[in-house]
Amino acid sequence: MEQAGHDLAEDAGVSSSAVDQTVRQILDLIRNRAMSVGDVLPTERELGELFGASRNTIREALRTIRTYGLIDPKPRVGAVLADRQNVAIQNFFAAQMDISKTSFNDIQGFRRIIEVSIGDHIILNASVAELGALDEVNGLIETAKDVQEAAQRDFDFHMALMKLAGNRMLVQTYQFLSPVIQHIMTVGKSIRPVLGETRRAHGEIIAALRARDRIAYSYLMSRHLDFGLRFVPDDLENARAAPMVPSPDMSSSKDLPHA
Amino acid sequence: MEQAGHDLAEDAGVSSSAVDQTVRQILDLIRNRAMSVGDVLPTERELGELFGASRNTIREALRTIRTYGLIDPKPRVGAVLADRQNVAIQNFFAAQMDISKTSFNDIQGFRRIIEVSIGDHIILNASVAELGALDEVNGLIETAKDVQEAAQRDFDFHMALMKLAGNRMLVQTYQFLSPVIQHIMTVGKSIRPVLGETRRAHGEIIAALRARDRIAYSYLMSRHLDFGLRFVPDDLENARAAPMVPSPDMSSSKDLPHA
DNA sequence: AAACTCTAATCTGGTCCAACAAATAAACAA
DNA sequence: TTGTTTATTTGTTGGACCAGATTAGAGTTT
């Protein structure tokens, strides 16, 4: 049976499909040329000539890279290196159909494991000034105009905590999960909007950190996360009302600054 | 900084590209027919006729769904509904994160945070039989013929622990880091090969779990990780592990070092 | 007649090709 | 400056062929 027990790279056959090879080649191209966001890839025809593949093959490879949120093709310009992984990840999770209970519980459980246990690191690393900045971030929560912005502020606070732990892998992982976490927050807040309570809970957490009280931190953070999760329904089906299922790809969304 | 413009919910994508529409249609098809893993989608030609799109468009849409890990096309059969999100999520991981920018200390610190704090979850979730299986995995360590295999066995033990915690996100994250972790282990063991000590330390950890003693687990695991880290030099720049370039799709995921 | 073997037709995804449509950056004209 | 044209690029289509696996069937053997 197909079980996850096996390691990846079992057959490691050198012969993969032309599209897969092209994906690798394009990613290598991006890496070797040290391209960054905003740069444009060669045109599809040029890539085809470069790698000896037809334009259809190139397009399928670009479609994969595009699904990762790494590029955003524009007519007349080419594929622009993009930074839309958050949208891509959101689409990824939205495409999973059994996303309802298990996956969200997994992610919340993952948060719980991480956030509760970083107290020690924050206590060791964070300065008084940094804790003050935390207070400032927390204060913004109640200025949110709508549910989505409130979720954004809430997430900002937890992300600020992550950063204080002083571990980049931690921050990257949390960043990776940010679309889903914010979605969970949005759903929870739209069901039960209690910005004041959230702010107070965050404040208590900050106070525990100021007192360098790791026991209090663990308790308060654990309680805070449990409380938030309580109001997330088991079936997130109606959650589709929230902006969880945008266009499958990024579809060159124009980021109008004011619209 | 992240651009604050959240464009997710605004236009709801009334007029997206044909490929994007097709992706949605195929996903809807899967949902409406209540298809599950193992079922086969209609052929590309049939889908094209069904949705009024050319086969190339269908193929690009399928390529996206494939990148999500939802299907696994097989010649002469069709696109089989698959359950390869674990591989897919790793590719998304790799596409977003630049491991090279995180130091090995970051990754070890990340391990420490996770592995030390999952004791509670293992104590709650793991049965006696599962702890016995853990013993079995641990016993294989001293059968390793070379350093690399020893690192593999060592990693297997820690991965088995992760799985006992009962959180898939955790397992996927650990799986994603496996090349780097195993590399660290390999370096450490080649500097100071102490398979017996490792096995004994693991045994103590298992004993703590059997006794449902969370304090002992935290202490022993923490000591174990610190001990292993002590013999890893700080700069592992020259000895990079496998590159973290994502395998394009799930088909035959291979982590061959380039060059 | 029934069972087995080998072969050819058939169906699938994988790849390629040529063309046209739509969008738009850039050059150009008013 | 403003509107228009042009050229280039992606988006989409319809077709073609290939490699490989499955299937149907003819032929052979029991």
Image (cartoon, coloured by chain):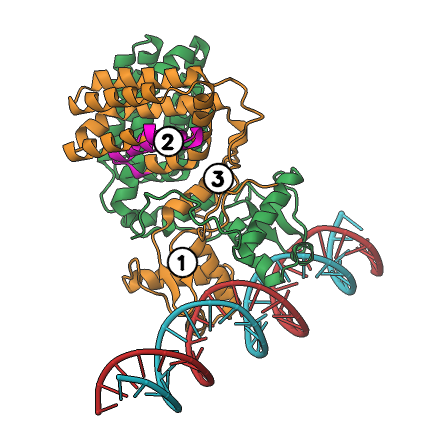
Chain colours: A green, B orange, C red, D cyan
Q: Are marks 3 and 2 on the same chain?
A: yes
- The region drawn magenta spans B141-168
Q: Residue at x 27, y 61 (%)?
A: B34
Output the chain of dot 2: B
Describe the element under mark 3 as helix, strand or loop.
helix
In which quadrant is the C terminus of chain B drawn?
top right
Q: Are marks 2 and 1 on the same chain?
A: yes
Any part of residue B5 in sight? no
**What amino acid is at disc 2?**
Ala
Q: How many neighbours does mark 1 have within 10 angstroms: few (below 14), some (14-19), or many (20 or more)?
A: many
In which quadrant is the N terminus of chain B drawn?
top right
Q: Are marks 3 and 2 in contact (CB under 8 Å)?
A: no
Above/below status of A195 relative to B41: above
Above/below status of B153 relative to D2: above
Describe the element under mark 2 as helix, strand or loop.
loop
Q: Position of residue A121 (x, y in %)?
A: 38, 16
Mark 2 or mark 1: name the one nearer the start of the chain.
1
Q: Quadrant of residue D27?
A: bottom left
Q: Residue at x 65, y 39 (%)?
A: A32
Residue behind mark 2: B144
Any part of residue B231 in sight? yes
Q: Quadrant of residue B213?
A: top left
Residue behind mark 1: B72
